Amino acid sequence: MSKWFKIEHKGFTLWFTGLSCSGKTILADAVAEELRKRGMKVERLDGDVVRKSLTRDLGFSDEDRRMNIERVTFVAKLLTRNGVAVLASFISPFNDIRAYSRNEIGEFVLVYVKCSLQACEERDVKGMYAKARAGEIKNFTGLDSPFEEPDSADIVVETDKQTVEESKKIILDTLNEMGYLP
């Protein structure tokens, strides 16, 4: 093959779901770095960043959470169909909205970043859990708003029992088995 042609890889969305402070962002960043090293086109969609731009008009009611994920799903679908590896890290607390994203995007791999509530609270450097417990933050997932454990996760990592490297390896090995890696 000529040096002028670049081999394109199939796009996919790797969707990280889990409680706040479970390790979604850290893990997605670590996987993204590895995918870039392999020459893949990678985009990161992160809940905290997206809420400052694309969905800044939304709150945290169940309806607003669903709208947030619908918008992100639209962006992920566009990128995925154009050969990009999209790494999306969102609490996305409901099974039905994750199923919607899977159906819309198609090439979708769900990673459940499983972590005990206690470990999440211990990792919380922003003090969000403490504020929620004090009533300063309403509709906080895992406390006064539900988080449904995924019923169709393709990958489960337990970040309170595994290192970032161990979890990253599980994800990369599974992506390789699924045929998504070069």
Image (spheres, helix red, strand yellow):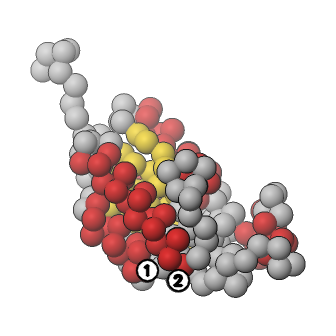
Which residue: 80% across, 58% down? 126
Residue 154 in the image: state x and y as whole percent. 38, 69
Residue placed furthest toward the left = 1
Sort mark 2 into few (<14), some (14-19) or many (20+) by Cα contacts within 10 Å: some
Q: Residue at x 73, y 69 (%)?
A: 120
Instruction: Kindly indicate whether the residue at mark 2 contacts the one at mark 1 (C-beta within 8 angstroms).
Output: yes
Label 1 to label 2: alpha-carbon separation: 6 Å
Q: Nearer the viewer, residue 106 or 145?
A: 145
Image coordinates for residue 132, horizontal then vertical, percent:
79, 75
Describe residue 19's horizontal placement relative to residue 10 as left or right: right
Tell me if I can see residue 118 in this picture.
yes
Q: Is residue 157 visible?
A: no
**Which quarter of the image is occupied by the C terminus?**
top left
SS at badge 1: helix
User: Dot 2 corresponds to which residue?
Assistant: 148
In-front residue for pair 172/68: 68
Give SS at disc 2: loop
For badge 1, the amino acid type reads Asn
Hey, what amino acid is under mark 2?
Answer: Glu
Residue shown at the point (66%, 66%) measured from the top left: 20
| Earlier sequence position, callout 1 versus callout 2 | 1
Image coordinates of residue 19 in percent, x first then y, are 63, 71
Residue 140 percent coordinates (x, y): 69, 76
> Tag on residue 95?
1
> Which image quadrant: the N terminus?
top left
Q: Nearer the viewer, residue 89 or 164?
A: 89
Q: Is residue 92 left or right of residue 143?
A: left
- Describe residue 11's horizontal placement relative to residue 146 as left or right: left
